[in-house]
Amino acid sequence: MRRPSARRITALLAAGVLLPVLAACGADNDKGGSTEGGDSALVIYSGRNEKLVKPILDKLEKAVGAEVEVRYGDSAELAAQILEEGERTKAGLFFSQDAGALGALSREGMLQKLPQSSLDAVDEAYRGSEGDWVGLSGRVRVIAYNPDKVAEGKVPDSVHDVVKPEWKGKVGFAPTNASFQAFVTGMRVLEGDDATREWLKDLKANGKTYAHNLATLDGVEAGEVELGLVNHYYWYERVAEKGEDKVNAKLKFLPGKDPGALINVAGVGILAESGQSATAQKAVDYLLSKEAQTYFADTTKEYPLAAGVTSKVEGLPPFDSLESPDIDLGKLESLQETLAMLQDVGLV
């Protein structure tokens, strides 16, 4: 395994990614997994929210027939911790909220190759180009809008339009949110750093910041802003909870492969030298199974990526109808550069 370079760790520290995790969790010298159970125990570092995925991870423990310990945190911070721990990491499986964190570990040789059967379960666009991680569920960036404030036909068709003068003070977004940062990274890959930096400056001048996607959606519903940049599933979860007639917001799925229509994925990779490979592979197989994929479709309102499962969420556009930009999701790994840019612009 290629040991992550000091320069790589320094970059993550400088971006402010690594410090919070090391302060909270620390790193020690033990190998991953149980000291008695060897490969039978599985430690999962999960960048996905505990409330969102705990039910399916509880079922996973039974499916793999082994003890499972889950450590929750931010995906980028957990990836940084794994890079710092190196071959000493306790993580056997990394369950990331986004492809970028998986790409960062792949680049440093921290992940092992997956069986072709696991890779073939998912379209090539939604798995690692090195064959060492696989997407489980997808979510698309959208524009939420308040129909009392703006007519459907007036909602912008591009994120480039939301920075125009007519939308000044009318756009909500969450710059500290991992999905927003992954979208910005995608824009950097697609359009370059200079264009992305200028767009962020214009967005800062035009917009109102929120702590997270749900708060952004709240702002749209309350009429604090007319538009909000969010992931699609937050709206569908709220509709499932309250009923569509009780949700004072609508969604615009962007056309024309706009960078604002990025499809990002939550996915998993097995840590190469954790000593938990066999159990971790069982976990991957389960998360790609019909039961788990149906959970992502029906409960989290995301797009399932494997097992032939399709979403039955009412009103959700078919996955193959989405006009996402063509991008190698593994290239979203340059998160530290995105964070530096957001800091430079004054958004984080």
Image (spheres, rainbow, N blue to C red):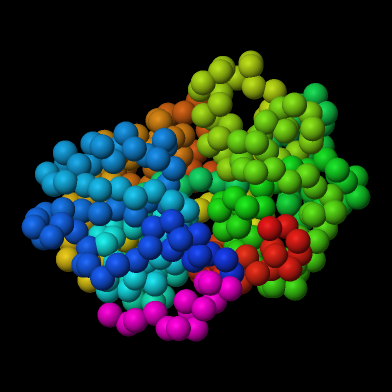
Image coordinates of residue 237 in percent, x first then y, are 51, 29
Could you say which is closer to the camera, residue 103 or residue 23? 23
Position of residue 253 relative to residue 81, above or below, is above
Could you say which is closer to the camera, residue 241 or residue 326? 241
Position of residue 154 relative to residue 268, above or below, is above
Image quadrant in which you'd find residue 49 = top left
| 172 left or right, relative to 140 | right
Q: Which residue is painted at 39% across and 72% down in the image?
A: 84
Is 213 one of the magenta-colored residues?
no
Q: Which residue is painted at 75% across and 26% down in the image?
A: 222
Image coordinates of residue 50 in percent, x first then y, are 40, 40
Q: Which quarter of the rendering shows the C terminus?
A: bottom right
Image quadrant in which you'd find residue 238 = top right
Say how many tags the image has. Answer: 0
Residue 127 appears in the picture as rendered: no
Image coordinates of residue 3 in percent, x first then y, are 34, 81
| 156 left or right, relative to 60 | right
Q: Which residues are magenta?
A: 1-14
Could you say which is closer to the camera, residue 68 or residue 249? 68
Q: Which residue is painted at 62% across and 43% down in the image?
A: 212
Position of residue 102 relative to residue 45, above or below, is below
Q: Which quarter of the rendering shows the N terminus?
A: bottom left
> Going by the picture, which residue comes out furthest to the left?
36
Q: Which residue is painted at 91% across and 50% down in the image?
A: 165
